[in-house]
Image (tube, rainbow, N blue to C red):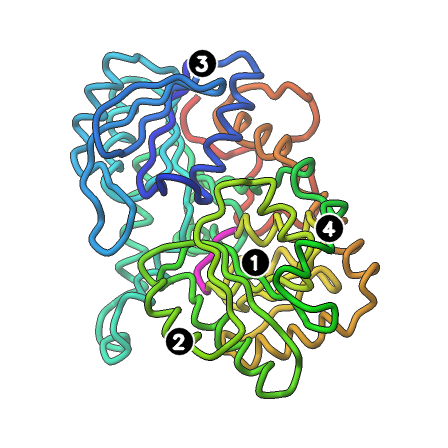
């Protein structure tokens, strides 16, 4: 089968969508399928990777970010006409929506991945003074209902992400968890020399990984460090990532023991950093899965996560703490985690991450496409708690 993956909002060097698409493409290729990826970029190009043929189409930058968006879906549709795929997989809920209608007309089975909660994003972007006036939730419901009608299958990665589709009664919703590279991210990467480059043995080493953009709430991580310092808890914070909020966060962290690493291109170095930390801060309130947090747990490092994000359903006692979205509550979470026995919390965090191998994700997506997996096991059976209210196994699609 020929599978075309199309996406927007793919960061040029890293990011959850890019990581997800790479692992899925590798799994599809290993299962004997041909994969084409259509992505936005600075210029038109075609390149080949071991996983896929990557078609980059020139697209404008989103102001204030390093994201590019394919604003003309008809260019993508012309490519689909020429490629004649058997399946299309869309990682975008905005300008690439017409690809679902194209697939319906062409008799091609279609799948769209919900990488965000639209109702939460709209609420985040709506000024507080207007939240009680503008119909944010109903606008999200109308948009989601139209999206569900357009594609054969809607995939959500957590029950939290799928709940807005459950609310509207979508019958083609399928829940498939994302995964983590358990070989790269592991506890034995702990490096005492690297740790001492950032913090003394007597200090708590905190790490925040991700794009420095407003929705990731890096300010909460900085505020948590400030609160720990105020309490007299010797702590240091390392922020690995870059983005439009870096200048603002640098000013906020002035005078505090905060180190900005910028983007860490070496994934092995990042894995070593995660394994060498005492706790990871994941303060984003609209995370629908949180790959960086899962990579931290795979590295044996527990996480403090925002209570309103999907990460709240991923962490378990010992592997992480769920906290309200403020600096002092995140500081409370850090103190609670570091009070636990070190080897125990590392073992529990790793055990939790081992429930999310990429093989389960790949099998789940192949099943959502109506294709057989290579492993032959239940694609949705990685863990009982992968199944939320939005998991409509057996009836995930309308079209055969």
Q: Is residue 344 above or below residue 58?
A: below
Label 4 close to label 2 by CB (< 8 Å): no
Numbered label attached to residue 252: 2
Closer-to-camera residue (215/175): 215
Q: Residue at x 42, y 67 (%)?
A: 217
Numbered label attached to residue 311: 1
Label 2 close to label 3 by CB (< 8 Å): no
Read off the magenta span: 285-289
Image spot of residue 191 (x, y percent): 72, 51
The mark nearer the N terminus, 2 or 3, is 3
Q: Which residue is drawn at 47% across and 73% down?
A: 220
SS under mark 2:
helix
Image spot of residue 385 (x, y percent): 67, 50
Closer-to-camera residue (98/33): 33
Determine crowd level at label 1: few under 14, some 14-19, many 20+ residues with C-alpha closer than 10 A: many
The residue identified by callout 3 is 34
Q: Which dot, 2 or 3, sits closer to the camera? A: 2
The residue identified by callout 4 is 190
């Amino acid at each position: 089968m020929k599978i075309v993956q199309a996406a927007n909002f793919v960061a040029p060097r890293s990011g959850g969508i890019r990581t997800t698409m790479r692992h899925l493409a590798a799994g599809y290729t290993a299962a004997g399928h041909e994969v084409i990826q259509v992505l936005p970029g600075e210029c038109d190009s075609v390149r080949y990777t071991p996983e896929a043929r990557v078609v980059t189409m020139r697209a404008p930058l989103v102001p204030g970010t390093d994201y590019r968006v394919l604003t003309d879906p008809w260019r993508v549709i012309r490519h689909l006409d020429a490629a004649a795929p058997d399946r299309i997989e869309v990682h975008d809920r905005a300008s690439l929506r017409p690809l679902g209608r194209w697939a319906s007309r062409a008799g091609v089975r279609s799948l769209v991945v919900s990488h965000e909660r639209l109702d939460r994003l709209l609420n985040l972007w709506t000024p507080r003074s207007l939240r009680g006036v503008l119909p944010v939730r109903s606008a999200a419901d109308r948009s989601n209902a139209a999206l569900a009608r357009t594609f054969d299958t809607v995939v959500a990665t957590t029950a939290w992400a799928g709940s807005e589709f459950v609310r509207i009664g979508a019958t083609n919703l399928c829940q498939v968890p994302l995964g983590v590279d358990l070989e790269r991210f592991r506890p034995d990467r702990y490096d005492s020399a690297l740790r001492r480059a950032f913090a003394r043995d007597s200090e708590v080493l905190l790490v925040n990984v991700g794009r420095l953009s407003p929705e990731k709430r890096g300010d909460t991580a900085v505020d948590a460090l400030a609160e720990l310092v105020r309490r007299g808890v010797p702590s240091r914070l390392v922020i690995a990532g870059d983005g439009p909020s870096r200048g603002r966060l640098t000013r906020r962290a002035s005078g505090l023991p905060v180190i900005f690493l910028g983007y860490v291109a070496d994934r092995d170095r990042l894995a070593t950093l995660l394994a060498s930390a005492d706790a990871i801060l994941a303060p984003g309130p609209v995370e629908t899965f949180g790959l960086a947090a899962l990579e931290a747990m795979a590295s044996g490092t527990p996480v403090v996560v925002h209570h309103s994000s999907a990460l709240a359903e991923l962490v378990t006692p010992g592997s992480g703490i769920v906290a309200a979205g403020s600096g002092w509550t995140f500081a409370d979470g850090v103190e609670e985690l570091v009070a636990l026995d070190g080897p125990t919390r590392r073992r529990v965090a790793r055990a939790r991450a081992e429930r999310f191998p990429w093989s389960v994700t790949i099998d789940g997506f192949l099943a959502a496409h109506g294709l057989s997996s290579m492993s032959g096991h239940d694609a949705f059976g990685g863990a009982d708690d992968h199944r939320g209210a939005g998991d409509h196994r057996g009836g995930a699609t309308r079209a055969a």
